[in-house]
Image (cartoon, rainbow, N blue to C red):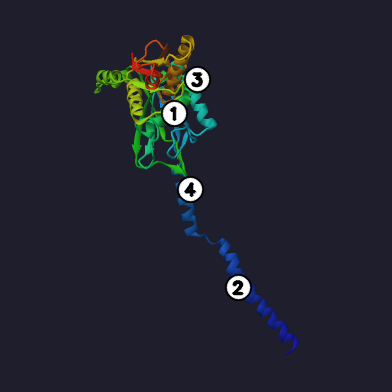
């Protein structure tokens, strides 16, 4: 084959190869890919629907943030730290409530039907609402500014094992809130029931801590419900001891037990300003101090509604 023929053949091969490479790579770069574009739109849409905003809205305040308060599944504790944008909203709410004392905020907490409630509250949603309330109080807001509710729903927005913002806030006029709390509920009967069989917590010797059984937990639920719905209600917590040791020491120990009980109740949603404590020391025994069982019965706190 002559050199001229080889030269022409090389040109032809180059043209064919160049055309192939152009069609395969360059044209594909210019073409749109509808399937990929549709997939991208769907992904963006899903991201938007996952946002559960933090909203405080009422006459005189309107604050919104795409960040929110979060909870782990089955947990009643706010995940800390809370985002800065939410903290800013809480500060604005404090300023609003300080200037509008007749306004009150109802916090509604949500939980799903699949979650387990291990708290003393009737449901996990209410427990979450009260933990949010306690967090707000820790930031300087008054516990008296809030009512709490809990709702159980089928599902909530999640990210892995985290629930995104399962709380909502409704601003009400204080007088309207008081009136609604009094409708349709026989709170006098509930008070009589609580005081007829008061919550009694027993303590080990020289100790002021306690593990609650199911009956005691139910009584705390009843007390909490009453206090949350009767605005002028207060609790009396009285600490007692056996007669072992000096009376003065036992009075101090009785007070520690009363203070422990107050702290426990306040952590479970009852405003500490609504809980009065006192100690009777060994002065009001209910058991025989000459027996071990009698002494055990005397080491107690008694919770009643005043």
Determine whether 29 is above or below 272 in the image: below
**Residue appearing at x 44%, y 42% in the figure:** 158
Q: CA distance from mark 4 to mark 1?
A: 33 Å
Q: CA distance from mark 4 to mark 2?
A: 37 Å
Specify the quadrant of the image occupied by residue 23.
Answer: bottom right
Mark 4: few/some/many CA within 10 Å (<14, 14-19, 20+): few
Q: Disc 1 marks which residue?
A: 131
Q: Disc 4 marks which residue?
A: 44
Q: CA distance from mark 2 to mark 3?
A: 73 Å
Q: CA distance from mark 1 to mark 3?
A: 15 Å
Residue 234, position in %: x, y? 36, 15
Ranked by sequence position, the earlier of labels 4 and 2 is 2
Disc on res. 20: 2
Q: Nearer the viewer, mark 4 or mark 3?
A: 3
Q: Are marks 4 and 1 in contact (CB under 8 Å)?
A: no
Ranked by sequence position, the earlier of labels 2 and 1 is 2
Q: Disc 3 marks which residue?
A: 140
- Say what secondary structure mark 1 lies in: helix
**Residue appearing at x 64%, y 72% in the figure:** 18
User: Where's the N terminus, which quadrant?
Assistant: bottom right
Q: CA distance from mark 2 to mark 1?
A: 67 Å
**Residue appearing at x 34%, y 34% in the figure:** 151
- Say what secondary structure mark 3 lies in: loop
Residue 255, position in %: x, y? 45, 14
Specify the quadrant of the image occupied by residue 123.
Answer: top left
Q: Are marks 1 and 3 in contact (CB under 8 Å)?
A: no
Ranked by sequence position, the earlier of labels 1 and 3 is 1
């Amino acid at each position: 084959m002559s050199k001229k023929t080889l030269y022409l053949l090389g040109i032809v091969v180059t043209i064919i190869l160049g055309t192939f490479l152009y069609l395969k790579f360059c044209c594909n770069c210019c073409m749109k890919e509808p399937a990929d574009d549709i997939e991208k739109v769907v992904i963006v849409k899903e991201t938007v629907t996952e946002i559960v905003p933090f909203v405080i809205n009422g006459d005189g305040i309107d604050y919104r943030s795409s960040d929110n308060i979060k909870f782990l599944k089955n947990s009643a504790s706010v995940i800390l730290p809370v985002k800065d944008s939410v903290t800013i909203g809480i500060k604005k709410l404090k300023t609003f409530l300080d200037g509008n004392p007749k306004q009150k905020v109802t916090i509604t907490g949500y939980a799903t039907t699949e979650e387990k409630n291990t708290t003393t509250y009737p449901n996990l949603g209410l427990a979450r609402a009260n933990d949010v309330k306690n967090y707000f109080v820790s930031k300087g807001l008054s516990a008296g500014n809030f009512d709490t509710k809990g709702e159980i729903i089928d599902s909530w927005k999640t990210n892995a094992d985290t629930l995104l913002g399962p709380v909502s806030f409704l601003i009400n006029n204080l007088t309207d809130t008081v009136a609604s709390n009094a409708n349709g509920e026989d709170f006098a009967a509930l008070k009589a029931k609580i005081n007829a069989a008061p919550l009694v917590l027993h303590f080990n010797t020289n100790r002021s801590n306690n593990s609650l059984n199911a009956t005691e937990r139910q009584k705390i639920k009843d007390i909490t419900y009453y206090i949350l719905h009767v605005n002028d209600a207060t609790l009396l917590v009285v600490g007692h001891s056996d007669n072992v040791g000096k009376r003065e020491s036992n009075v101090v120990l009785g007070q520690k037990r009363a203070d422990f009980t107050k702290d426990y109740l306040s952590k479970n949603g009852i405003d500490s300003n609504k809980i009065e404590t006192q100690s009777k020391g060994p002065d009001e025994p209910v058991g025989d101090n000459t027996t071990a069982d009698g002494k055990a019965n005397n080491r107690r706190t008694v919770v009643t509604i005043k």
